[in-house]
Image: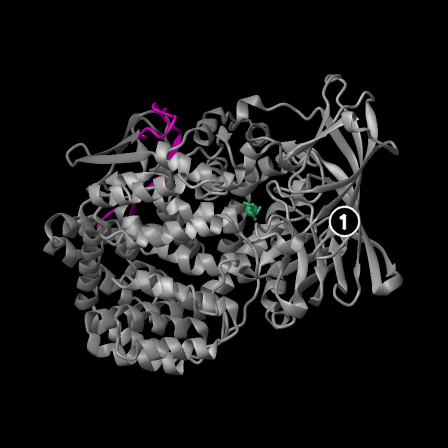
C-alpha cells in the first residue's frame, strides 16, 4: 500500500545518539550499533520499530541484556522491539555483504582489482541496509563512527564529521574514529574505505573557520580533480556572499566513484560523486562536462544548508531541499558564467523532461501526496519544476526580500526537519506578505497553459493584453484550480525601443518592465498612452513554468529576436518561430515560406552580430529536439516528427549556408583550444553549431568535419566533429569511431560519450547497433553510467530509433529493463519511464508499447521500483 502524506505522524521513538562500529570486509562486514532511544511521552504503547533490509541479525541487546525471542520480531523489512521503558540503549550486531550489493544502496563496493573500495549511498532509504534504524528523515541523531579494516587494502578510512583518532591494530588492521557534532538524519550518513589518492586544499570561512578540503579518487583519476577543487572553493565563497551561508565543520571531503545511480550525494561533510560530475581535464572532458562539474559541486555543497542543516520532515517534502538547492545551483552558475545560457538550458530540460512527465501517467505534484517507492520521485518535477517554484517566489519577493526570507527560514529551522509550509511561512514573515496561494503550485500536478491574446486601439492609444490559464487533468486530479502566475512583460516598438507600461488608472511614472500577476482563470491588462502598436515580450526570463500559447505575429517575433534586451526572450522568440515552422511542416509537408524567410533572416542577423554572445547564437541556431517538439501532440508519429524537424533544420542550414561557413572559418583560427573560460567555450559551441549546419546543407562539406576531427585539441571539438560525421553517415565515420575508441581506450567516462553518440543516431539500424554495443568491453550492465550512456540515451533521447515501427526498439529496451531489475532496480525503473508516454502515440506504436509494459508487469519478482513505474504507466 502507498505511503500517504496525510498519514504523517511524528516518530514515537527518537534516537539521540548513535555509535557505529564497522569491521569492514567486502565479503562480510560486521556492523555494531548502539542507539540511545527515547519514547515520545504521548505514545506510551508504541513499540520501537527499526527499519531493516537484507541484514543478518547476529545479536540484539537492550540495556546490555540479550533479548529473548518473544521480546522482538525480526521480519524482512523491520526489527520491532517491545519496550516497557521510556528510554533505552539498543545494541545490534549485523552482517552485510557489500561485494554482492549491485543495487548500489547501502554499503557497496566500487571499482575493480587493486583499487576496489567500499562506500555508501543512503538517500533515500539505504541506511536500513546497513543497520537496524528508524530510517526516516525526521529522526535526527548525533553520530560517532569507528571504522576498522585491513590497512593495506583500505588505507583511507572516512566517515561524516571531524576526525577523532586513528591507530593501528593487530593483524595488519587499523582503525579511525569520526564524530559529527551536527545531528543528522540517517540518509546523510556515509563512509568510504579504500586505497584512494587525495588532493588537499584549504578554505577560510567568513566566520574565520579554517576548513581542510579533500578530494579523493582512484589513482588514474586524481589528476583530473583540480577543476572540482576550484569549483568547491568558488561555491563556498559564493554561498557566503550571496546567501550568508558558511561551512560548519573543520573538514570537507569529496569522493569520486564510477558506480553510482545518480549524480552525487550531499552526505554531511563527505559528499560522494559520480565521477562523471567530478573529473575534468581538456583532453577528457567536454565544455559541458566542465560546467556540469561546477554545477554539481555547487549543488551538493549548497545542500549543507538547504538539506542538511535544515532537512525534510518526510520524503513528500523532497522538493523542499531539492527544488531550493537546484535554484541555488542555477543562481551560482548564472552569477559565475552566463545567466542567459543557463536559463536556456534549464528551460530546455524543463520542457523535455518535466513537461512530458506532467503530460503522462507518471505526473505528480512537486509535493506528491502518495508514493509506493520514494526512489521514483527523484524526478524532473521535484527537482526542476520545484526550482521554478522557488524562482517564482524569489521574483515575487525581489532579490532582497527573498534573501531575508531565506535567512529567516534557515534561522527558524536550523537543526530541524521542515516542511514546505515552514518554508513559505518564513518567506511570508520576513516580508509581511501572504503566500498561501502558492501552496497550490506544490500540490497540483500538470503544466498550466497560458494563453495570451492582444488588441491595440491606435485611436485610444490603448493596448490590451488578455491572459488566461488552463491546466488539463492529471491522474487522480480531475479538476484543477487557477494558480498565481507572474507574467513579466515589456513592450517595444518595432525598432526595439522600450515603450512605457502604464496600466489604466495608474498615476506616476511608467515602468519599463513589470510583473503582471495572473491570479485567476483570466484577466485583461489595459495599458494606456501606448503611442504605437507594441511588440510584446512576454514571460521574460521565463517567469513561470507554463506552456505559452500565443499566436504572435512572425514579424513581431523577429523584432524580439533582433532587439529584445532579455537574452532569454531573444532565444524564446526564435524558438517559438521554429516550433511554428515545425508544426506547419508536420501538418502540410512544408513550413510557410514567408515565416520561414522571416526566421532565417533574423538568425542571419544574429549570426552576423559581433556583439551577441556566440553561445546564445548557437542556441538560437539549434532547434528543439524531436521529443520536445512532439510534446503536446496526440497520436504522435515519430517518423513524421523526424521528417518535419529535419525539413526545418535543413531549410535554415541552406538559407544560411554561406554565412555559416564564413563564421565557421572565422572561429577556426582560435588559439584557445584548451581554455575553459566561458568565452572560449561559447566560441566552440557556435563553431560546432556552424559545422553541423554547414554539413547538413551540403554533404560536400563533410571533409571539414573530418579535418576538425583529426586536428581537434580538445574533447568538445573532437566529439562535435564525430557527431556530424555519424549523423551524416559520412564515408570514414566508422574509421573515426574506431580511432576515437582507440585513442580513449580505458577511459570510462569518455567512452560513455562515445556510446551515447552512437545510441542517439536517428538511423534505422541503430537498435541493432546499440544491442551489439552491449557486448563491447566498455559496457557493463552493472555500471549505471554505462547503462544510461547507451540504453538510456537510446530509450530517452532517440525517439526515431526507439519508436521504430516494428517495435524492435521497444523490445530491446524492455528486455534491458527486465535484466537490470535483478541488478539495479533504481536504474531499471528509470529506464522504464521511456514507456510512460505510450498513450500519446499513434495506434500501432501505442499497442506495441502497451504490450511491452504488460510483458514487464507479468514478470514475477519485480522490484518495488519497477512495479511502481509499470503499474502507474498502465493505470494512468
Ligand atoms: N540528494 C541527491 C542530490 O540531489 C540525490 C540522491 C538521490 N538518491 C536516490 N536514491 N534517488 O544531490
Ligand atoms: Zn540535490
The location of residue 289, given as percent across then percent down, is 49, 64
- What residue is drawn where x is 78% and y is 29%? 69
Q: Is residue 209 shown left or right of residue 265?
A: right
Quarter holding residue 153: bottom right
Q: Does the magenta stretch include residue 859?
A: no
| In the image: residue 654, left or right of residue 116 | left
Within 10 Å of disc 1 (Cα), the crowding (few <14, some 14-19, many 20+) is many
Question: How many labels, in total?
Answer: 1
Name the residue located 81 percent from the left edge and 20 percent from the top edge.
Answer: 84
Instruction: Give the magenta part as a residue range.
Output: 471-499
Image vertical order of residue 732 relative to residue 751, above or below:
below
Q: Where is 348 relative to 385, above or below? A: below
At x 51%, y 28%, the residue is 2
State the residue in front, 46 or 659. 46
- The secondary structure that most of the magenta stretch takes on is loop
Q: Can residue 510 be seen in this view?
A: no
Task: Identify whether 650 is placed above or below 340.
Answer: below
Using the rendered image of the protein, determine whether residue 702 is visible from the camera's viewpoint: yes
Q: Percent from the top left, x then y, of residue 835? A: 35, 44
Give x and y (percent) for residue 513: 37, 42
Instruction: Identify the residue under disc 1.
Output: 30
Asked whether residue 489 is drawn in magenta, I would say yes
Q: Does the residue labelled 1 lie within 8 Å of ligand 1?
A: no
Quadrant assignment for the C terminus: top left
- Element at label 1: strand
Residue occupying image coordinates x 36% and y 66%: 758
Residue 665: image location, x then y, percent? 30, 78
Amino acid at each position: 500500500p502507498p505511503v500517504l502524506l496525510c498519514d504523517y505522524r511524528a516518530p514515537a521513538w527518537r534516537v539521540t545518539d548513535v555509535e557505529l562500529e564497522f569491521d569492514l570486509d567486502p565479503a562480510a562486514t560486521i556492523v555494531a550499533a548502539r542507539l540511545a532511544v527515547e519514547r515520545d511521552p504521548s505514545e506510551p504503547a508504541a513499540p520501537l520499530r527499526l527499519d531493516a533490509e537484507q541484514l543478518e541479525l547476529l545479536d540484539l541487546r537492550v540495556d546490555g541484556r540479550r533479548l529473548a525471542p518473544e521480546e522482538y520480531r525480526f521480519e524482512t523489512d523491520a526489527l520491532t522491539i517491545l519496550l516497557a521503558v521510556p528510554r533505552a540503549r539498543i545494541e545490534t550486531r549485523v552482517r552485510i555483504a557489500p561485494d554482492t550489493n549491485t543495487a548500489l544502496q547501502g554499503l557497496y563496493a566500487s571499482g575493480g582489482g587493486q583499487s576496489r573500495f567500499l562506500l555508501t549511498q543512503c538517500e533515500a532509504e539505504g541506511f536500513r541496509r546497513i543497520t537496524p534504524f528508524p530510517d526516516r528523515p525526521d529522526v535526527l541523531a548525533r553520530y560517532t563512527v569507528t571504522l576498522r579494516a585491513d590497512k593495506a587494502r583500505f588505507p583511507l578510512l572516512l566517515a561524516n564529521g571531524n576526525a577523532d583518532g586513528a591507530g593501528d591494530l593487530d593483524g595488519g588492521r587499523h582503525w579511525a574514529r569520526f564524530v559529527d557534532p551536527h545531528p543528522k538524519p540517517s540518509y546523510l550518513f556515509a563512509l568510504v574505505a579504500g586505497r584512494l589518492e587525495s588532493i588537499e586544499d584549504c578554505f577560510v570561512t567568513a566566520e574565520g573557520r579554517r576548513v581542510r578540503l579533500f578530494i579523493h579518487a582512484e589513482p588514474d583519476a586524481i589528476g583530473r580533480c583540480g577543476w572540482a577543487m576550484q569549483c568547491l572553493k568558488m561555491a563556498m565563497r559564493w554561498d557566503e556572499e550571496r546567501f550568508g551561508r558558511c561551512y560548519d565543520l573543520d573538514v570537507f571531503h569529496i569522493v569520486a566513484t564510477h558506480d553510482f545511480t545518480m549524480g552525487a550525494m550531499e552526505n554531511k561533510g563527505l559528499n560522494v560523486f559520480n565521477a562523471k560530475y567530478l573529473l575534468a581535464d581538456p583532453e577528457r572532458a567536454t565544455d559541458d562536462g566542465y560546467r556540469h562539474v561546477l554545477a554539481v559541486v555547487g549543488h551538493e555543497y549548497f545542500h549543507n544548508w538547504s538539506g542538511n542543516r535544515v532537512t525534510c520532515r518526510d520524503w513528500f517534502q523532497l522538493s523542499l531541499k531539492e527544488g531550493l538547492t537546484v535554484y541555488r545551483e542555477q543562481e551560482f552558475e548564472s552569477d559565475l558564467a552566463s545567466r542567459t545560457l543557463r536559463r536556456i538550458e534549464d528551460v530546455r530540460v524543463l520542457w523535455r523532461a518535466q513537461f512530458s512527465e506532467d503530460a503522462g501517467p507518471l505526473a505528480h505534484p512537486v509535493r506528491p501526496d502518495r508514493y509506493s517507492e520514494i526512489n521514483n520521485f527523484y524526478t524532473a518535477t521535484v527537482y526542476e519544476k520545484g526550482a521554478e517554484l522557488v524562482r517564482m517566489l524569489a521574483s515575487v519577493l525581489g532579490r532582497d526580500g527573498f534573501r531575508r526570507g531565506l535567512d529567516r527560514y534557515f534561522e527558524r529551522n536550523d537543526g530541524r526537519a521542515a516542511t514546505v509550509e515552514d518554508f513559505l511561512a518564513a518567506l511570508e514573515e520576513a516580508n509581511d506578505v501572504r503566500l498561501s496561494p502558492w501552496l497550490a503550485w506544490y500540490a497540483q500536478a500538470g503544466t498550466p497553459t497560458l494563453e495570451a491574446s492582444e488588441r491595440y486601439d491606435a485611436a485610444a492609444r490603448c493596448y490590451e493584453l488578455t491572459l488566461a490559464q488552463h491546466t488539463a487533468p492529471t491522474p487522480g486530479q480531475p479538476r484543477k484550480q487557477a494558480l498565481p502566475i507572474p507574467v513579466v512583460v515589456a513592450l517595444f516598438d518595432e525598432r526595439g525601443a522600450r515603450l512605457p507600461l502604464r496600466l489604466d488608472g495608474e498615476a506616476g511614472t511608467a515602468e519599463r518592465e513589470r510583473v503582471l500577476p495572473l491570479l485567476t482563470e483570466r484577466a485583461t491588462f489595459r495599458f494606456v498612452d501606448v503611442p504605437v502598436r507594441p511588440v510584446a515580450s512576454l514571460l521574460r526570463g521565463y517567469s513561470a513554468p507554463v506552456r505559452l500559447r500565443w499566436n504572435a505575429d512572425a514579424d513581431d517575433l523577429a523584432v524580439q529576436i533582433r532587439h529584445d534586451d532579455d537574452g532569454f526572450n531573444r532565444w524564446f522568440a526564435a524558438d517559438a518561430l521554429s516550433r511554428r515552422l515545425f508544426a506547419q511542416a508536420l501538418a502540410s509537408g512544408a513550413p510557410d515560406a514567408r515565416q520561414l524567410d522571416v526566421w532565417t533572416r533574423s538568425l542571419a542577423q544574429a549570426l552576423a552580430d559581433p556583439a551577441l554572445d556566440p553561445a546564445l547564437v548557437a542556441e538560437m541556431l539549434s532547434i528543439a529536439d524531436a521529443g520536445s517538439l512532439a510534446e503536446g501532440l496526440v497520436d504522435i508519429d515519430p517518423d513524421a516528427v523526424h521528417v518535419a524537424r529535419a525539413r526545418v533544420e535543413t531549410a535554415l542550414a541552406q538559407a544560411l549556408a554561406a554565412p555559416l561557413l564564413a563564421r565557421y572559418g572565422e572561429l577556426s583560427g582560435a588559439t584557445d583550444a584548451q581554455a575553459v573560460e566561458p568565452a572560449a567555450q561559447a566560441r566552440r559551441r557556435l563553431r560546432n553549431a556552424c559545422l553541423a549546419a554547414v554539413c547538413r546543407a551540403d554533404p560536400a562539406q563533410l571533409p571539414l568535419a573530418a579535418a576538425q576531427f583529426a586536428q581537434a585539441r580538445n574533447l568538445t571539438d573532437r566529439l562535435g566533429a564525430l557527431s556530424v560525421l555519424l549523423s551524416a553517415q559520412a564515408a570514414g565515420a566508422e574509421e573515426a569511431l574506431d580511432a576515437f575508441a582507440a585513442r580513449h581506450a580505458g577511459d570510462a567516462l569518455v567512452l560513455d560519450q562515445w556510446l551515447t553518440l552512437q545510441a542517439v543516431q536517428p538511423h534505422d539500424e541503430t537498435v541493432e547497433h546499440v544491442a551489439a554495443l552491449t557486448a563491447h568491453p566498455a559496457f557493463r550492465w552493472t555500471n549505471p553510467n554505462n547503462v544510461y550512456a547507451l540504453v538510456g540515451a537510446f530509450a530517452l533521447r532517440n525517439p526515431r530509433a526507439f519508436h521504430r515501427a516494428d517495435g524492435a526498439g521497444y523490445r530491446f529496451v524492455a528486455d534491458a529493463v527486465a535484466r537490470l531489475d535483478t541488478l539495479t532496480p533504481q536504474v531499471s525503473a528509470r529506464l522504464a519511464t521511456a514507456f510512460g508516454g505510450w498513450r500519446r502515440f499513434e495506434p500501432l506504436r501505442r499497442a506495441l508499447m502497451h504490450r511491452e509494459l504488460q510483458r514487464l508487469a507479468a514478470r514475477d519478482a519485480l522490484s518495488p521500483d519497477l512495479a511502481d513505474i509499470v503499474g502507474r504507466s498502465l493505470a494512468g
